[in-house]
Amino acid sequence: MKKWISLVFFITTMGFTTSIFASDQALQYFQAKAAEQKLPEASAAVANKDYAKAFEIYKRYAELGMPVAQYMLAYLYQNGFGVPKDGDLAAAWYGKASGQAFPPGQFGLGMMYYYGIGVSQGLTEAVDLFNQAALRNHPLAQYMLGYLYAQGYGVTQNVVTAVDWYTKAATQGVVQAQYNLGLIYYSGAAGSTDYTKAFNWFSLAAQQGSEKAKFMLGLMYSLGQGVGLDKAQAFNWYKQAADKGLAVAQYNLGIAYYNGQGTQTNLGLAIAALTSAANQGLPRAQYFLGYLTFNGIGVAKSLQKALEWYMKAAEQNFADAQFAVGYVFHNGAGVPKDDRQAFTWYLSAAKQGLANAQYMVGLFYQQGLGIPSDTQLAAYWYGKAAEQGMDNAQLLLGVMYSQGQGIPKDNKLAYTWLNLASTSSNSEVRDAAVKLRDELAKSMNAADINAAKQQSQTYFNKYAGAQWK
């Protein structure tokens, strides 16, 4: 050992260190050659989950300053592969790789700042690092910039800029960028809807296995958006996504089986798909299973089991299910009749804009069912339902305006709502509205009647147009 130390010292004093051993260029050359042999071995070790071996190799070359090894060492520390998980060391090694302008290191450190792992959380720092990596064409950094600009996190929200970054990442094969681009073009979030571009991006993402993209392709085929309407193709895409466990696809698949859309009607398969979605917590599926169970369609009729499904969806604020729970308690269907409980659920659904529920809340207030009577609130909720085309609400609101119940008496508004109710498909509502409207017209002048008719048309155009959107 002493002889070796003396030899090194002798060579150093003779001036050979600079020309042979200490040259940075030469040292890096030999390190790179060694790394060419060892780093693939480390990569294979990671693939084989031999993390201890990978850690040993990466640590050696990370300490020699090789950025790819520093990055991978950080990755191992971050995930606890072959070493105890350590966010601080992960951030430190990402930082070393980032300091050498290594794009994966910049991205890795950016993610640490984004989540606040090993460093104090800082969106400003994250955005700066993502920018550095993205400008060096790092696809995941480009995706993250797209996401941040789309959401307005750490930057001023700008969907157009988000599209630009998403496109850069998507063209490099980042599946989530492809899917997000599809959503932007589908929804028109960047300014205008473009179903063709949406379909193309969803198709690319679906080819890489994105279940959500497969579902969106099914939806677009089902509605004929950006592609010819094709229920069979829609069914095939729904099934592919459903088979991978996507709850919303399982629901649509169940509906396809139930209605025989793109496939033969099959209640058994419909219920199986709906149950899979419901068990994942999808409220729409839970509600529909409640409906099937309540009515004994494809399953044994059980009011108790139906209420259980309705409640699961209602507790997730699903308006149709809240209305159904209200109906169950109002009518005592399998449970003791409880108008107070019914009103609570009807009101929850009404506040979400469900016209049927708004009408029932108005009725409860008018008749004092489970709550004190309040004609002013009754008129308010009838108005909400009437503006959405609820014929019963239009009839009762017209009566309240004609009599001044809870609202100031107003013959023109009374005529307006009775005139709308007179177009109901329900003969009882229609006949009552026609009779009351024509009787009211006897005390009105032609100008007021014409004004009321015009107002009726305005309301009709509004809610009829909303139904077709």
Image (cartoon, helix red, strand yellow):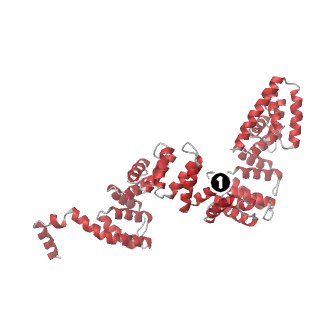
- For this rendering, which residue is in front, 320 or 132? 132
Residue at 55%, 42% (x, y): give it: 191
Residue kind at label 1, given as amino acid type: Gly
Residue at 41%, 56% (x, y): give it: 138
Residue at 54%, 44% (x, y): give it: 190
Residue extending furthest front? 228
The quarter of the rendered structure image containing the C terminus is top right
Q: Is residue 251 visible?
A: no
Locate residue 391, reporting x and y percent. Answer: 81, 41
Q: As displayed, is residue 340 above or below residue 32?
A: above
Q: As displayed, is residue 417 above or below residue 186?
A: above
Quadrant of residue 363 in the image? top right
Q: Is 150 situated left or right of 406 in this image? A: left
> Badge 1 local density, few (<14 within 10 Å), some, or many (20+)?
few
Q: Is residue 193 visible?
A: yes
Q: Is 198 situated left or right of 131 in this image? A: right
Locate residue 221, reporting x and y percent. Answer: 65, 55
Locate residue 69, reporting x and y percent. Answer: 35, 65
The quarter of the rendered structure image containing the N terminus is bottom left
Quadrant of residue 40 in the image? bottom left
Locate residue 59, reporting x and y percent. Answer: 34, 67
- For this rendering, which residue is in front, 168 or 91? 168
Q: Is 359 situated left or right of 237 in this image? A: right
Q: Secondary structure at mark 1?
A: loop
The residue at which mark 1 appears reads as: 228
